[in-house]
Image: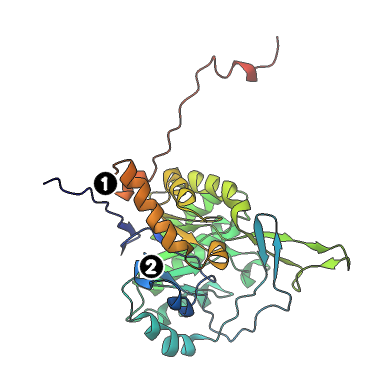
């Protein structure tokens, strides 16, 4: 009897074991989706970002569509820590995937305090959204500069024993440098990346389409850029990378893994197709099955880069 070929989809991301590499991006997933998909099919849960203070979010309108993309300015609405502890954590306890809690704060000390308070039974890891504005840096995101990213990550590392994932922003000149700083300060993994700062204008009213004027660009349009950023970070850090940006199919997820990501997060695609994450898991498994790849981890860093010889580069030389 021929033993059927089996695929090991499990991955380890910064000390956290996942049954497969697919999970939601923060802010794009809620408990109500359990009516649409089997939650136990996911690699992990990543919550909406939690803040200490109650937040109503940004003024309406908050979302605008553009070709191949979505611009949102939701503004991290939050019901605060007590509500999260009492209502949200128990809901996820009924399912098998580990719970990753996304947090945000205006200061490094605020991040650390929040991480310490949410280091609780039922929470498997902390994802620090350091791509939010930082009051200590004149409104810039912590992740825009290596120095501020390192400072907040050190504070977080000292505050929690849980695996610490640090979510970076693509809105920086050298994301690999920021990733190195987070790694040096004790991050167990980095999420590459959040949305791109952008805007849209209504040609009927001559006004910005968003109530907040600017918002974050997500969706398939940003995938080639974030894929490049994942590749650059993977060449410079040893900790795992979670790719996030424009993933809507198994092929997208596999590209990210080939570029160096150990796992992926899915966001905008879930708005268009609520079962997108489950379809991506199935597609990754089928891809590996067709190519007789035993372990999905074999895909990580699998992109082949051929070194060009002098003859290949001759056309770059100026005429003599």
Q: Can residue 293 be seen here?
A: yes
Q: Can residue 185 be seen here?
A: no
Callout 2 environment at 10 Å: few (<14), some (14 to 19), or many (20+)?
many
Alpha carbon of mark 2 to alpha carbon of mark 1: how far?
Answer: 21 Å
* Res 58 quadrant in image: bottom right
Between disc 2 and disc 1, the foreground one is: 1
- Residue at image location 52% in from the left, 56% down from the top: 248
Specify which label sits upstream in the sequence, 2 or 1.
Answer: 2
- In this view, the residue in front, 132 or 306, is 306
- Residue at image location 81% in from the left, 63% down from the top: 201
* Res 169 quadrant in image: bottom right
- In this view, the residue in front, 208 or 311, is 208
- Residue at image location 49% in from the left, 54% down from the top: 249
Q: Position of residue 64 (x, y in %)?
A: 71, 66
Q: Count the marks: how many? A: 2
Q: Which residue is mark 1?
A: 294
At mark 1, the secondary structure is: loop
Q: Which residue is mark 2?
A: 44
Q: Position of residue 181 (x, y in %)?
A: 48, 55
Q: Position of residue 229 (x, y in %)?
A: 54, 48
């Amino acid at each position: 009897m021929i033993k059927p070929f089996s695929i090991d989809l499990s991955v380890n991301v910064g000390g956290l074991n996942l049954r497969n590499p697919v999970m939601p991006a923060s802010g794009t997933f809620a408990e109500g989706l359990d009516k649409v998909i089997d939650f136990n099919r996911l690699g992990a849960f990543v919550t909406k970002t939690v803040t200490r203070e109650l937040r109503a979010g940004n003024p309406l309108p908050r979302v605008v569509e553009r070709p191949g993309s979505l611009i949102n300015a939701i503004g991290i609405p939050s019901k605060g820590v007590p509500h999260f502890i009492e209502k949200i954590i128990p809901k996820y306890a009924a399912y098998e995937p580990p719970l990753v809690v996304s947090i945000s704060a205006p200061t490094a000390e605020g991040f650390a305090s929040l991480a310490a308070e949410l280091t609780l039974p039922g929470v498997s890891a902390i994802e620090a959204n350091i791509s939010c504005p930082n009051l200590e840096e004149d409104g810039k995101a912590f992740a825009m500069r290596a120095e501020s990213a390192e400072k907040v990550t050190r504070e977080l590392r000292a505050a929690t024993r849980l695996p610490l994932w640090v979510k970076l922003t693509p809105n920086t000149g050298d994301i690999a440098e920021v990733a190195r700083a987070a790694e040096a300060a004790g991050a167990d993994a980095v999420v590459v990346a959040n949305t791109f700062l952008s805007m849209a204008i209504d040609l009927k009213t001559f006004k910005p389409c968003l109530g907040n004027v600017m918002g974050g660009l997500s969706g398939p349009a940003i995938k080639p850029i974030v894929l490049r950023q994942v590749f650059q970070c993977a060449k410079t850090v040893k900790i795992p990378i979670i790719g996030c940006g424009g993933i809507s199919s198994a092929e997208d997820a596999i590209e990210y893994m080939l570029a160096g990501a150990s796992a992926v997060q899915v966001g905008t695609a879930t708005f268009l197709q609520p079962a997108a994450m489950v379809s991506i898991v199935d597609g990754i498994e089928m891809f590996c099955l067709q190519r007789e790849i035993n372990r999905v981890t074999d895909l990580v860093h699998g992109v082949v880069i051929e070194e060009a010889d002098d003859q290949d580069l001759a056309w770059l030389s100026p005429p003599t």
